[in-house]
Image (cartoon, rainbow, N blue to C red):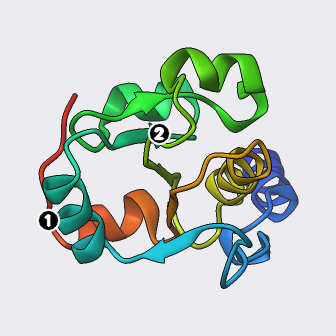
Amino acid sequence: MRYLACVLLLCAAMPAAADKPLAPDTVPGTLLVSAEQAVVTVQTTPQMVIIDSRLGEEYAKGHIPGAINLLDTDMTEAALSRIAPDRATPLLFYCNGERCLRSSNAAAQAASWGYGTVYWFRGGWQEWLRQELPVAR
């Protein structure tokens, strides 16, 4: 009985995914894309750099093929310029989906640093998986 009470208390204390804020509908300076648009954009833009803004553990479990893991809180202007030294390089940012703010924050930051073509994949990893698109591990 004591065990059950502890489990119930722990479950009640954990925030539900629905309690997380929604990512914004748009990010100034970026182009919003769906999974299908992301695929087409990547296929037609060979110089595109895909940035996975999730935790390294999440990235290791699976990511969009060709994506580079750069956690939003680790993304400095210098770190991004090592990945994409030319600010004309198209960038695509994603994270876990509509309840993840990492990619919207990172994409906004890249745009503020003068990167001219910044795509933001709001649906992120969750939409990618729902569409059954290729996964790299």
Identity of the residue drawn at 68% across and 67% down: 29
Residue 7 percent location from the top left of the image: 74, 51
Q: Nearer the viewer, mark 1 or mark 2?
A: 2
In the rendered structure, which amino acid carries the disc numbered 1?
A: Glu
Left or right placement of residue 103 versus residue 43 in this view: right
The residue closer to the viewer here, 85 or 106, is 85
In the rendered structure, which amino acid carries the disc numbered 2?
A: Ile
Left or right placement of residue 118 versus residue 9 in this view: left
- Mark 2 closeness class: few <14, some 14–19, many ≥20 residues within 10 Å: many
For disc 1, the marked residue is: 132
Residue 52 percent location from the top left of the image: 47, 40
Residue 131 percent location from the top left of the image: 19, 72
- Identify the mark at residue 120; answer none if there is no mark: none
Q: Secondary structure at mark 2?
A: strand
Q: Is residue 96 above or below residue 21?
A: above
The C terminus: image quadrant: top left
The residue closer to the viewer here, 43 or 66, is 43
| Of pointers 1 and 2, the one earlier in the residue sequence | 2
For disc 2, the marked residue is: 51
Left or right placement of residue 84 versus residue 24 in this view: left
